Amino acid sequence: MPILIIGGVTIDILHLPGRTAPITAAGGAGMYTALASHRVCAAHRTPSVHAPARDAIPPVTLFAQRPHPLPDILQPIAQTLNWIGPVITPDELPRLEIAHYGGGKAALLNAQWGAQATLTPDALPEDLSRFDWIHLAVMVSPQRQLEFLDVCRTRSHAQISAGTNGKNAHGEPEKVRELIRRTDLFFMNENEANALFGGVENARAEPGKRLMITLGERGAWFLEGDSRTHLPAFPVSEVDPTGAGDTFCGATLAGLANGLDAVSAARAGIQLAGETIQAVGPERLWKL
């Protein structure tokens, strides 16, 4: 069940509790989502003697800008994923400086967005029909996600999911709500649900739609129709929470793509997110 992740790759400078010096790591919503999807798909995938052509299709494709030459820190991504997209120079790669303070508190200290705004649907492959799921990771704006959504709907019959961030949810809530209405599955965290619905308790999934709301160490909610299912988290020793929500998203998508029901897929997402935050950056995601 091939998955296309549309998003970004960054280089992150991380200030973590208990560390006297910052750490540089690969980052980006698109990258974390795609690596998590690949990790779960690889665990489910078994070769088929009846459909060798299908087995040859990469389970996960990441559409994101690709720096050339590729910095060493991004080499594991290129070795793990089918990474396609427009070529940029290394200097055009977005760079983020993030401070984590524990307890779910973090701050973006500095951001150099590079060529992020130039990632547009024009560079997408003309034929997206082989993908069963397409995910729109958070982008420069919800309007850009909607532009990608329009193109993906015309070029595929895939189920389409998307996510957001605090900046977009608080700054452009109507656009994000439009994105929620027009996708099949939407991911958000508690802070974003507060901005979009006035509280997690007020969140509702429209008929035929599904919502996933992450709650950090308290797990997640799955909403479908009038049904609300709480999924508890697993207690872990947190080292670096960067990308936890995107990891949950990618693993959940992969579970769905491989035939799991939504609750089971989300449980797998919570488990992998918990594993990921016990190491720095995405290093747990490219170790099968």
Image (spheres, rainbow, N blue to C red):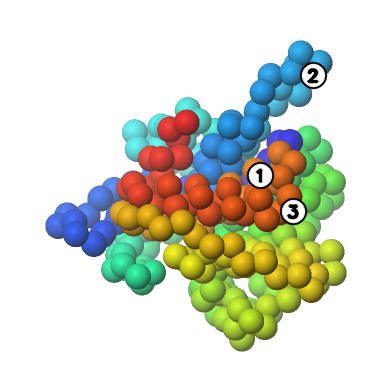
Vertical order, 260 against 140 (above or below): above
Question: Which amino acid type corresponds to the residue marked 2 in the rendered image?
Answer: Ala
Foreground: 13 or 92? 13
Disc 2 to disc 1, C-alpha distance: 21 Å
Numbered label attached to residue 77: none
Say which residue appears at 49% left-offset and 60% top-offset. 233
**Disc 3 on helix, strand or loop?**
strand
Q: Quadrant of residue 242?
A: bottom left
**Disc 2 on helix, strand or loop?**
loop
Disc 1 to disc 3, C-alpha distance: 15 Å
**Which of marks 3 and 1 precedes in the sequence?**
3
Say which residue appears at 70% left-offset and 70% top-offset. 228
Vertical order, 63 against 242 (above or below): above
Residue on which the image places disc 2: 51
Say which residue appears at 46% left-offset and 40% top-offset. 285
Residue on which the image places disc 1: 255
Decide: few, some or many residues near mark 1? Use Cα within 10 Å; few <14, some 14-19, many ≥20.
Answer: many
Question: Which amino acid type corresponds to the residue marked 3 in the rendered image?
Answer: Ile
Q: Position of residue 83 (x, y in %)?
A: 56, 35
Question: Which amino acid type corresponds to the residue marked 1 in the rendered image?
Answer: Gly
The N terminus lies in quadrant? top right
**Which of marks 2 and 3 precedes in the sequence?**
2
Residue on which the image places disc 3: 160
Q: Position of residue 117 (x, y in %)?
A: 54, 58
Mark 1 or mark 3, whichever is nearer to me? 1
| Residue 115 seen by the camera | no
98 to the left or right of 255: left
- The extreme left residue here reads 20
**Which of marks 1 and 2 precedes in the sequence?**
2
Say which residue appears at 74% left-offset and 53% top-offset. 160
**Mark 2 near mark 1, Cβ–Cβ under 8 Å?**
no
